[in-house]
Amino acid sequence: MANEPFFILEGTHYVPTQAARGPWNPNSLHGRVIAGLLGAEIERLHGDPEFIPARLTVDMYKLPDLSPVEVVTKVVRQGNRIRVIDAEFISGGVSAGRATCQLLRRTENPEGAVWRPASWDVPKPADIPPPEPRSGMWGMWATRRIQGDFGQAVQKRAWVSEVRELVGGRALTPFARVAVSCDFASPMANAGDKGLEFINSDVTLYLHREPAGEWIGYEVINQGATDGVSVGECLLYDEQGPIGSASCCALAQRRAPRP
């Protein structure tokens, strides 16, 4: 990847680059890089090819600035079939977020048929022209819109692909690719005809398999908001079919002006 990574590794700390800036404050990080780094570190330090990272829940309780970041992990449960790992996102010496990942041992599916949603019958990313360049978060990822845009109050479907490394010099694994992408569920679900005015406080990623290829498909299936608190949900796909889902809670919020 030729684009600048989100983080540069310096010793035991991850130093954010300007590419990691978020939409709410020009001197803070984007939620997607918080979720992505926590997930990637859990996989790097505790991953096992015999296990699938079936759930990653990330709490984002403080908007971190661009200070160097340390990720501290802890084994909660090291079982034969279920493993649970906690991780903490420490920015400038202050805790700004945490994650819990549940890893489940791979095995064979049981016999029998169960109900599943209809196949996701949409154009492939290669068959959709890229959108026109725009300001703001343009260039943080690549998108191919299938249905709806961020200025519309309609159900949205889109393909998303990463265009840069999460950490310089480390190739994205399939899990890291979807972990850094999953925060996209919030703007997909919460943006309406007035733009995006919700900042998500968490994201939960569920996977029954890791993605194949570079593109992750998002389909909004739910959004509700009362008293400035929203819940949004998306089904996730790759070009072969469904892989899981992502959900988020969010608070009504307004952006700080960029200089």
Image (cartoon, helix red, strand yellow):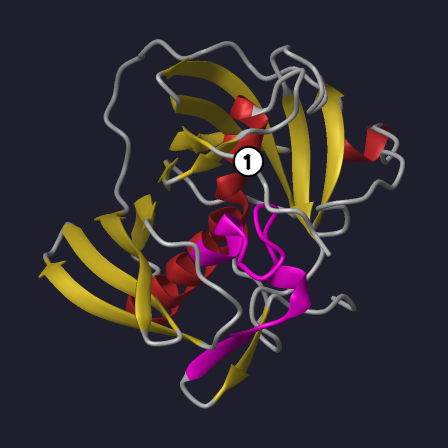
Tell me the quarter of the image containing the C terminus.
bottom right
Residue 48 seen in this snapshot: no
Front-most of residues 183 and 43: 183
Q: Mark 1 belongs to which amino acid?
A: Arg
Q: Position of residue 140 (x, y in %)?
A: 69, 52
Q: Residue at x 61, y 58 (%)?
A: 21
Residue 231 coordinates in the image, percent (x, y): 38, 23
Please name whichever residue, 26 or 161, is drawn nearer the observer in this view of the structure: 26
Q: Is residue 222 visible?
A: yes
Give SS at disc 1. Answer: loop
Rendered location of residue 67, percent (x, y): 48, 74
Q: Residue at x 57, y 46 (%)?
A: 24
Task: Find out whether residue 102 is within the magenta segment.
Answer: no
- Quadrant (top left, top right, bottom left, bottom right) of the N terminus: bottom right
- Residue 131 lies left or right of residue 71; in this view the side is right
Magenta part of the chain: 13-34
Question: Residue 33 in the image: x percent, y percent?
Answer: 51, 57
Depth order, front residue of 126/63: 63
| Residue 25 is covered by the magenta coloring | yes
Q: Is residue 185 above or below residue 153?
A: below
Q: Is residue 11 left or right of residue 21?
A: left
**Which residue matches tag 1?**
254
Q: In this image, 232 relative to 71: left or right? A: right
- Compared across the picture, whether 238 is left or right of 224 comes to right
